[in-house]
Image: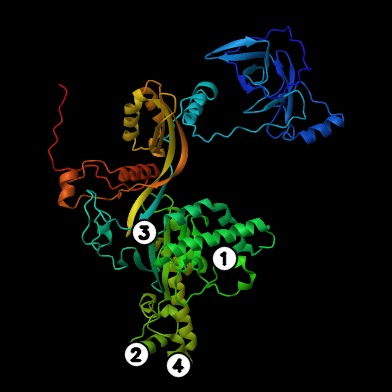
Amino acid sequence: MHIDQDKESPVGSDTEPEADQTFIAFARVMSGVVKKGQKLYVLGPKHDPEVALKEETSGHQIDDRLSIKDLSSNRHITVATVRDVYLFMGRELELMDSVPAGNVLGIGGLEDHILKSGTVSSTVACPAFTDLYFDASPIVHLQRCVDDLKERYAKIELNVSEAIVPFRETIIIPPKVDMVNEVIQDTNVVIKTSRMKEFEDDDEVLKAGLIQTYTANKKCCVVIRAQPLPEDITKLLEDSIDLLKVLDHLNKTSDIVSLNLTIQEGIRDFKSKLSKIFDESGKFWKGAIDQIWAFGPRRVGPNLLLNRIPEYKRQTVWTCLDNESEGSGEVWDLDNSFVSGFQIATLSGPLCEEPMRGVCFVIEKWEMMNETEKSKDSFEKESRSECSKTSVNDCDIDNIQKLPSKINFGNKCNSENEASCDKIEDSVSRKKNETYGQFSGQLISCIKDGCRKAFQTQSQRLVVAMYKCNIQATAEVLGKLFAVLGKRNGRVIEDEMREGSQIFNIIAALPVVESFGFADDIRKKTSGLASPQLVFSHWEVVDIDPFWIPTTEEEYLHYGEKADSENRAHHYMNTVRKRKGLKLDKKIVEHAEKQRTLTKNK
């Protein structure tokens, strides 16, 4: 707020009727003095002082009677009179005649001039102040909005759902210890979960993380491997989303000339960092920088699709950076179907339809299935019997449909029946297309399902968003504070005493899903002596298999036959699946054969 001390007007003598509710503008004086009865300009967030000064020099006058409701879309200035000036004293408001610079105050009479925020000034040359950005999470903002709707604006009861918390899905390297921290002697033995039973007899699963899948018409075979990305690569991809958007745009337009040198150097620097991390991550990732097919989901996410098809040397995603390399590779017709299937798979994972994070899918094989032939005699016999038909309507299409994979119509039919054979071939292929749909769509569905199945055969984990929690508390309440953090699955990262005082500075990590009501709980347990500040920090893997069940004798002794202690990851997963209306692996009636006696009120 900027105020010119020379501009002042007397207070009007007219009294206004009292209202049930009065809105008071909360402001701070940056320059000058605010006085009661002063006429000031109220500048909207889109106010441009250069435009306003030009209009003022051209003779344009601002109407004092206009409020914010009366302004057109290109006008952002109104004139308001300071009806009252208040000083905040705890819960009370103390009337003042004037407030100098550097103080926080309340201003009455601006309810018709400010919608959400604004700048109050004695001159139109003042630029509009922007909203303050708070890095901390507004833990009571949602409840405040709901209360305002119920009590002030709509004044009706609202059905408010629980807050939606984002999760991610990932896979990890198979663990070397079980749930009771005992070393797994045979590393080839997979820790069984309730999910692994689905793939024990599946012929498409070659081994953990490697599957072989086919299109619906069985004409295309694809081998897909799911591999966890190194954490450094995942973080680099998450930090470079803006560069990935530019890179995706360049691959579509090939217009690198229009980019400035800073962005070009940024992309090249990103490529060199990614290449360095790949080279340091092990033998599996050697040369992966030139095998990147796509990023996902939405083409900019922290997941990779790699091309390791021996006979397919396509252009890389870095081709746009070097014009000379253009044309060094070719793109096959169905290339985009692989990318589309990968994008769909990474956008909604199999655990609870949440996006994937830190997963790499490798296409190791892509081949069109060759049509097998029968023996020469049987082939000629079937060929003659089918080619003797004069019309496709005279034969049974269902019987003919069994033969296209056995017959090459163009080579085995005599010249007299070539036309009828072509008709039969066209009819059969047309019927197949009607049954399975376009081949590009079949391939998209094949890649999507293949990626999900390869993901499910690995060690699956949920990834939760984490808050960094800063708390100041005295030594007397530290025990209660740590108890609240432990109850909500938080952990203390740093704990040190402030020099020269009895106050401890505590830094903790807290899952976002556990943060609702956390501030109120802390204040209640510590009698108001501790207050948390929550800031988003990072994503963290929940190191529990969502489908884990006790298998070893030690696990039975520790957790019980049905894992009596709650599986946190399974609870999070079921919460999200229930919200989305997905199927839950939950028994509604567990012991249906047991007798159930109901008492009757007499």
Q: Would residue 522 be visible to someone looking at this image?
A: yes
Q: Mark 2 or mark 3, which has the lower sequence index? A: 2
Which of the two labelled residues, at mark 4 and mark 1, occupies the earlier sequence position? 1
Q: Which mark is residue 414?
A: 4
Q: Earlier in the sequence, mark 2 or mark 4?
A: 2
Residue 444 in view in this figure: no
Q: Is the residue 550 above or below the residue 104 in the image?
A: below
What residue type is disc 2 on?
A: Lys
Q: Relative to the observer, which residue lies in front, 100 or 211?
A: 100
- Label 1 amino acid? Trp
Residue 184 x %, y %: 22, 57
Hey, which quadrant is residue 379 in on the image?
bottom left
| Disc nearest the viewer among 4 and 1 | 1
* Amino acid type indicated by mark 4: Asn
Furthest residue in direction right, as rendered: 58
**Discs 2/3, front:** 3
Give the foreground label among 2 and 1: 1
Question: How far across and how far down the image is residue 258, in percent?
Answer: 69, 60
Q: Residue at x 62, y 59 (%)?
A: 265
Local SS, label 2: helix
Tell me: residue 327, above or below residue 304: below
Camera-side residue of 382 and 62:
62
Alpha carbons under labels 4 and 3: distance apart: 51 Å
Identify the element where label 3 is drawn: helix
Q: Which mark is residue 455?
A: 3
Q: Which residue is mark 2?
A: 381
Disc 2/disc 4 C-alpha distance (Å): 13 Å
Of all residues, the one furthest to the front in this rendering is 500
